[in-house]
Image (spheres, rainbow, N blue to C red):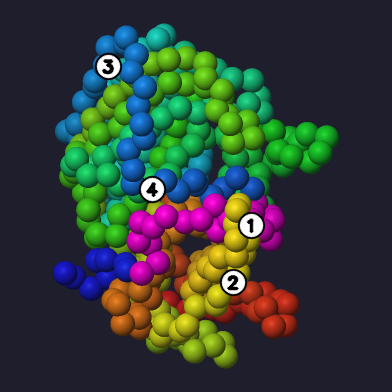
Amino acid sequence: MKKNDTIYTLQQNIEIPDIVTEKANMAFEQIRKDAGSSDKIVTYQKPVKKSRKKYMVAALIATLTVGAVSAYAAYTNWSHGMKEELRISEEQQKNLEANGMAAFSDASVTDAGVTVTAQQSITDNYYTYLSFKVEGYSVEKGVQPDFETISVTVDGQDVSWGGRFYDGMISGNDGMVVNAYGSAPETEADGSMIENYVMDDGSLEYHMILKSHEKGFFTGKQLHVELENLGTVAKAQYFPDIEGNWILDMTLGGADTAKYIETNEKLGDTETIVTGVELSPVSMRITYDFPKTEPRMEEFEDENGEIQTVAWPAQPPFAFGIRLKDGTVMKYISAGSESTGYTSEEGQEYVVSFPLDRVIDPDQVETVLFSEYDEENGKQLTYEVPLKAN
């Protein structure tokens, strides 16, 4: 097994008590508030197939293969929503096409009057981004659409994924939420944002991020996606609207375009040392020297009134942003679905990996910014790690 191919300890598939999940969600919400952003973190999905209802509807299957595509055809097939959400410039589009990270298709499936088109994928060593166009179904402004069940496999294996319909909201370089055109989002009387899921042409776009701890896992693999039923979501409750099945098989592209920089930077007065930074156009992977310590124990009362104990393992300062060579600072650039943990049971080398909420040029990154909360003094601490050429 290659170094860093597997992350142990912190992302084993374990049953997590509801109270712990609730605390984690509250923590994420606090991160959003502190960052000034909202609805940015992609929902993490355990690699488990959901139960499926049976309907008297024939499943329609379309196959998306990556073949020879002319530069003009590829360029015109870019997902409008993905270009907006990841802030992909024309030059970046051409680079992603040329290096093989971007793959395209116009394969479509129509059922119950709704057409789902597999538009494209962007794949690096550990993540793949997907975009599906949905036509024939619409919602009012501020109403969130969703599929009832989704199943995802890669070469027949369950994978971890996150996904949602694109709502036209992105975060600026300061981490504050804006709409894709740069202006402040519309808000309700209570201050909550009003999302707009409908594109200018009347379609919707469903975006997904898949992740793996194995380097190069997705490249050239067969992706199988099953989407079932459409409806809306409000306050974590699904409201059914249309019954249908949309099944797509995709052959992913992918390329190793990451830049790896060895470092030996101690973070402030901590005992944490950043030993390496791996940057691709769509993800970041940080390696730390961070010896394992005893977890912090916390007691809570479960639904039966019994006292339970949960262990909170120590974590190193998190990489929350970057500074480019031209001085531009980009904060809170994680798209969620972070992987964190030790690379061995001994607990010395620690890895944090996450997809980015935008496309970057790794060669233009000068510094990585780290942050942690100092509970003793009640303040946020930040650290900088310069990326020097090896």
Q: Find the magenta span and give its range.
A: 9-37
Nearest to viewer (mark 1 / mark 2): 1
Dot 2: what SS?
A: strand
Lower sequence index among marks 4 and 1: 4
Q: Position of residue 124 (x, y in %)?
A: 30, 53
Separation of residues labelled 1 and 2 (CA atoms): 16 Å
Q: Which residue is drawn at 40% across and 79% down?
A: 288
Lower sequence index among marks 1 and 3: 3
Q: Where is residue 25 in the image (x, y as percent from the top left)?
A: 59, 53
Q: Is residue 91 left or right of residue 32?
A: left
Nearest to viewer (mark 4 / mark 1): 1
Please report contact status of discs 3 and 2: CB closer than 8 Å, yes or no.
no
Residue beneath disc 2: 298
Residue beneath disc 4: 46
Dot 4: what SS?
A: loop
Image quadrant in which you'd find residue 280: bottom left
Q: Where is residue 43 in the image (x, y as percent from the top left)?
A: 49, 46
